[in-house]
Image: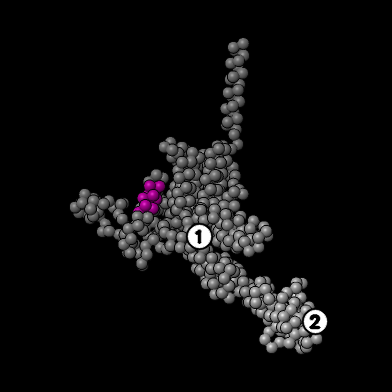
């Protein structure tokens, strides 16, 4: 009996080992495509793709990249995920004509395998602060005096500072801006040292916005090789050794099945709302929807759409870096446009509010950060909508101003009435379906049955005079 159990146990182990060897996912390479600015949406897509490769026990992750750069926070999330990935990650700057600028340079340096297609470029990784250039002034960084060659400082530069730790000081003298540059330099040099790539050129890409073509990058040791296609990446990466969490692993990538992973609905939704133009339009549409609901209680549709839009717009602002001054200007502009509806100024408040909204839209996001600029068509749509609302309110105000009063005591003035009884300049008239006390204007001759016009009200007594062309009966 024991022999039989041992035999079955051995068969199960052999079958399990066979299935593990035949696991199809182990012979797959997950291909992710980054063809946009680095944003929270693209970071979510890449991170989820790398995690999927880990769960499916894929042999390799390939990030096909063409990016102008993007947000530092999203870049750090992607880089940290690559560094912690148990699955080797290869970055391929492709197709021809693509670029790995700014944030793309950091992502390329963090990958286990770095490749570029012919006629592509990498570099220009100088960080840009919100609100403009990080340097200000003439935007030209300057460095301290390099290390002296006579050994006076034991191989160090001024004040014992090593050559690799030189601080770039902006011409404007801003310590905060220099701090951002030096932080980026330390980050990319750390990635270069980890992957065994050219750290000096990486520093120049940050400090001086240096760039390289694919062939030059290979010659400078910035990338591992030049590959024309994704299949070419697999063949050239085969046999290379990479470091996975301190363990040297030889890649066996030849013949891997390429599995393209497209962004799911969640990533697509984040991509839509993380667009600065969409975020601005959502905020404005949501605000106007709520205003129309307040002006027309019970309409429901404007309030429902407005509430959903403004909450979605606020979610977009929560994941995008924005300028508080721009947001304040937009809020002021919207308030002025609404004030036009409640205190008609015949367009003055509305025009001023529209100008504030457009200026706030320009300042809301930093146009120097790739993918975070508000386009003029979106600003034009907001301006036209605000102006149309203001002109509509101004027109309604002008029309109402020309109309006679429709409620209150003033409503009675000018109405026609019929005299029911009259004696000694006083009597009763029938007007507006009601019987009123009345007295005649001084000098007016009125008789019973005559048509009269209300001239004024004295308490609850109407002051009347004969209507034009009417003679006493």
Nearest the eye: 254 or 296: 296
Give the quadrant of residue 168: bottom left
Coordinates of residue 21 in the picture (x, y in percent): 57, 31
> Residue 129: x and y, percent?
42, 59
Q: Residue at (31%, 51%) from the top-left corner?
A: 164
Magenta region: 182-192
Q: Does the magenta stretch include residue 295?
A: no
Give the residue pinned by disc 1.
372
- Residue 143 image point, x, y percent: 30, 59
Front position in the image: 404 or 121: 404
Locate residue 5: give its quadrant.
top right
Is residue 332 visible to us here? yes
Q: Considering only vertical position in the picture, is 69 above or below 80?
A: below
Image quadrant for the N terminus?
top right
Q: Say whether disc 2 or disc 1 marks the residue closer to the N-terminus.
A: 1
Residue 189 highlighted magenta (yes or no): yes
Q: How far apart are marks 2 and 1 (CA)?
A: 78 Å
Residue at (54% x, 65% y) in the render: 334
| Residue position marked by numbered label 2 in the rendering | 449
Question: SS for tag 2?
Answer: loop
Quarter the C terminus occupies: bottom right
Residue shown at the point (78%, 87%) measured from the top left: 472
Q: Which of the pair 373/344 is nearer the observer?
A: 344
The image position of residue 257, as x and y in percent, is 59, 42
Q: Is residue 69 left or right of residue 441?
A: left
Image point (59%, 12%), residue name: 2
Tell me if I can see residue 122 in this picture: no
Q: How crowded is mark 1: few (under 14 residues within 10 Å), some or many (20 or more)?
A: many
Q: What element carries label 1?
A: loop
Circle nearer the viewer, 2 or 1: 2
């Amino acid at each position: 009996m024991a022999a039989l159990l041992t035999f079955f146990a051995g068969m199960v182990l052999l079958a399990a080992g066979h299935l593990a060897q035949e696991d199809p996912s182990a012979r797959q390479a997950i291909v992710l495509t980054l063809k946009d600015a680095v944003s929270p949406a693209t970071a979510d897509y890449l991170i989820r793709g790398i995690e999927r490769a880990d769960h499916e026990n894929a042999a390799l992750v390939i990030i096909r990249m063409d990016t102008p750069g993007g947000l530092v926070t999203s870049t750090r999330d992607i880089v940290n995920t690559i560094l912690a990935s148990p699955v080797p990650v290869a970055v391929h700057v492709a197709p021809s004509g693509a670029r790995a600028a700014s944030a793309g340079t950091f992502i390329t340096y963090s990958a286990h395998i770095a490749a570029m297609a012919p006629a592509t470029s990498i570099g220009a990784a100088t960080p840009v602060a919100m609100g403009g250039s990080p340097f200000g002034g003439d935007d030209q960084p300057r460095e301290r005096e390099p290390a002296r060659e006579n050994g006076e400082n034991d191989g160090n530069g001024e004040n014992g500072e090593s050559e690799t730790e030189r601080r770039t000081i902006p011409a404007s003298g801003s310590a905060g801006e220099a701090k951002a540059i030096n932080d980026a330099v330390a980050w990319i040099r750390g990635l270069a040292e980890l992957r065994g790539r050219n750290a000096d050129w990486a520093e120049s890409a940050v400090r001086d916005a240096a760039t390289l073509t694919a062939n030059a990058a290979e010659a400078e040791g910035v990338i591992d090789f030049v590959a024309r296609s994704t299949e070419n990446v697999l063949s050239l990466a085969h046999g290379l050794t990479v470091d996975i969490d301190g363990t040297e692993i030889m890649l066996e990538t030849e013949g891997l099945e390429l599995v393209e992973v497209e962004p799911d609905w969640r990533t697509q939704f984040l991509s839509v709302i993380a667009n600065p133009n969409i975020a601005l339009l959502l905020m404005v549409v949501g605000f106007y929807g709520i205003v129309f609901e307040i002006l027309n209680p019970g309409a429901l549709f404007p309030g429902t759409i407005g509430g959903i839009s403004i909450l979605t717009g606020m979610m977009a602002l929560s994941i995008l870096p924005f300028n508080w001054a721009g947001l304040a200007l937009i809020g002021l502009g919207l308030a002025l446009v609404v004030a036009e509806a409640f205190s008609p100024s015949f367009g003055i408040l509305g025009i001023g509010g529209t100008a504030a909204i457009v200026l706030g839209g320009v300042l809301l996001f930093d146009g120097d950060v790739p993918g975070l600029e508000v386009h003029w068509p979106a600003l034009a749509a907001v301006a036209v909508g605000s102006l149309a609302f203001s002109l509509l309110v101004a027109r309604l105000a002008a029309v109402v101003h020309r109309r006679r009063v429709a409620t209150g005591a003033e409503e009675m003035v000018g109405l026609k009435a019929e005299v029911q009884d009259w004696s000694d300049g006083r009597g009763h008239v029938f007007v507006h379906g009601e019987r009123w006390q009345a007295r005649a204007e001084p000098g007016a001759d009125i008789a019973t049955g005559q048509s009269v016009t209300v001239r004024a009200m004295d308490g609850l007594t109407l002051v009347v005079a004969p209507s034009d062309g009417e003679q006493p009966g």
